[in-house]
Image (cartoon, grey):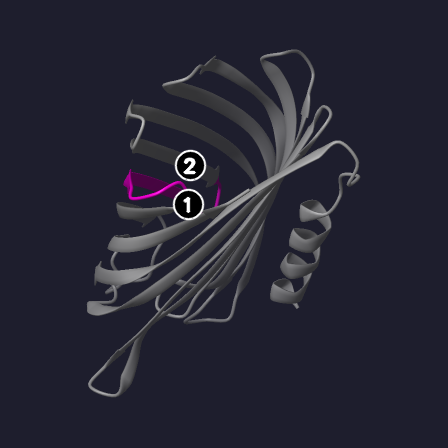
Amino acid sequence: MAKQAALAVLAALAGAAPAAHADWSGRGELGIVLSRGNSDSTSLNAEFDVAHAARRWRHDASASALRATYFGRTSANRLELQAQSRYELTPRAFAFAALRHEDDRYSEFEYQTTVSAGPGYVFLDDATTAIVAQAGVGWRRAEVRTTGFRESDPVVRADLYLEYHATPYTRLRNEFLVESGADNTYVQNELSLEVAMSERLALGVSHTVRHNDAVSPGVRRTDQLTTANLVLRFD
């Protein structure tokens, strides 16, 4: 039920703005994965991101999947969906509403779904550098894999987005996210580098760290994921 609800909200946020005066952009990735943590494997991953801007609204949606097998047995199986809508209050300040849903068969939780909202601010946005921060409150729903117990608690969410274009062909990006509640604190940081081969095609490498503070004995708190990807952009 949680997955179906997350998919429905993702679709609604992605298409909420009117088509007139809109600007679409997106990217897709496919690459090799080296996974170290609760799963230890080499496999494939895929990610798709789309953004839609219209007047003072911006809508972003993304889906990523990781699946690996080891000696014929599944060793990694993760699906993550994210969506966010933000409304421009001033040229720099905005308000946002966001959804994050994670279904990871090799983590402490069967699923985690978080909805949140709050203010944000664009500290810098020029030809080479972007710095955007946002913070808010929300609600988290999760199911503990070992017991089937369903947790539900308020959370505080904070994001920091950094992007730097070292050259016209090179982009360095870092995305930091923390969701903290009484039952668990989730932290994620993704550092990526893209080198363009053409206007639409690029090579990318990224390193992602995921951390759950509350886990059962024998389960690692931190997972690390290193990828090398072929990136396709579209406008």
Asked whether the beta carbons under mark 2 and mark 1 sit within 8 Å of each other, the answer is no
Looking at the image, the residue that sits furthest to the front is 198
Looking at the image, which residue is at 33% across and 33% down?
174
Q: On residue 200, which mark appears?
A: 1
Looking at the image, which residue is at 20% across and 86% down?
71
The boundaries of the magenta stretch are 181-199
Q: Main secondary structure of the magenta part?
A: strand
- Quarter the C terminus occupies: top right
Determine crowd level at label 2: few under 14, some 14-19, many 20+ residues with C-alpha closer than 10 A: some
The residue lying toward the viewer, choosing from 138 and 228, is 228
The answer to whether residue 87 is above or below residue 31 is above
- Helix, strand or loop at label 2? It is strand
- Quarter the N terminus occupies: bottom right
Q: Amino acid at mark 1?
A: Arg
Q: Which quadrant of the view contains residue 105?
A: bottom left
The answer to whether residue 112 is above or below residue 199 is below
Question: Residue 190 colored magenta?
Answer: yes
- Label 2 sits on residue: 177
Q: Amino acid at mark 2?
A: Leu
Q: On residue 85, which mark appears?
A: none
- Helix, strand or loop at label 1? It is loop
Q: Which quadrant of the view contains residue 127?
A: top left
